[in-house]
Amino acid sequence: MNFLISKEKREVVSINEEIYSGIIVIDPGHGGEDTGAISQNNVNEKDVVLDISLKLGEKLEENNFKVYFTRKSDKALGNTVRSDIINRAKFINARNADIFLSIHLNGSDVESAKGVESYSRFLDDKSYLLAESIQDELSSIEYTKDRGIKETNEKSLGILRYTNITGVLLELGFITNSEDEKYLISEEGQDIIVYCILNGILNYFNEIK
Ligand SMILES: [Zn+2]
């Protein structure tokens, strides 16, 4: 038996370990030379997504998931954006995993742009269901704007095009917006976001079983 703290009440509830086992790949976006988006205070997307990803991995392992990371340190997986994406996709495709999550933050020249959004793979029902399960949880805390689920095959979201297992790309907020940034870099904000993603994943596995 393992324990999961619900995000609303912070009460400890027990969950059945038999139900929730699976293999998950976590892909913290960017790394190394590739900083991702940068805030006014010079906080880099690559660092925040790594922190959140490592916390998420820990919680998933506590819930009997086998977890792989595309990176656990500050490095890129290729010398160019394209080779980086291709190498991440190869890694993900080779793990025989149930799902993968690519973890990102948004950036914009418009300071007021804010909110959380989830990307599903183009015309992929399971990917959409996973995105929906997680987005529902993330939007329920109302820490920022709910930008909804986006279904796209745009080039910038190549990881969803080059992978062949169920997956989502999460944009957990805008690092370029001071309110989103404050939440995203705080311990409490990160903990709540991690619980939301975990709950979304558990809901997804319940739904498809
Ligand atoms: Zn990114």
Image (cartoon, rainbow, N blue to C red):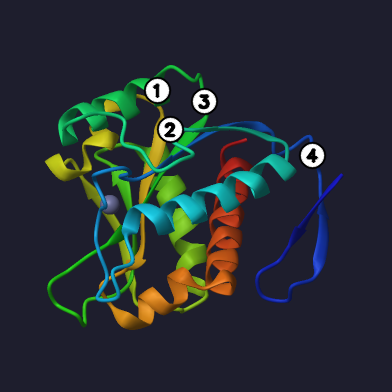
The amino acid at mark 1 is Phe
First along the sequence among labels 2 and 3: 2
Q: In the rendering, which numbered label is found on residue 91?
A: 1
- Looking at the rendered structure, which numbered label has been put on residue 70? 2
Q: For residue 154, what is the image quadrant?
A: top left
Q: How many marks?
A: 4
Give the crowd class for mark 3: few <14, some 14-19, many >=20 residues within 10 Å. Answer: some
Earlier in the chain: of badge 1 and badge 3, it is 1
- Amino acid under label 3? Ala
- Residue 170 lies left or right of residue 12; in this view the side is left
As measured in the structure, the alpha-carbon distance from the residue carrying label 4 to the one carrying label 3 is: 18 Å
The residue singled out by tag 3 in the image is 97
The residues bearing labels 1 and 2 have C-alpha atoms spaced at a distance of 7 Å
Q: How far from the left and from the top, in percent, is residue 205? A: 60, 41
Question: Does label 4 or label 3 sit earlier along the sequence?
Answer: 4
Q: Secondary structure at mark 2?
A: loop
Q: Are circles 1 and 2 on residues that touch, CB within 8 Å?
A: yes
CA distance for labels 2 and 4: 25 Å
Above or below 201: residue 117: below
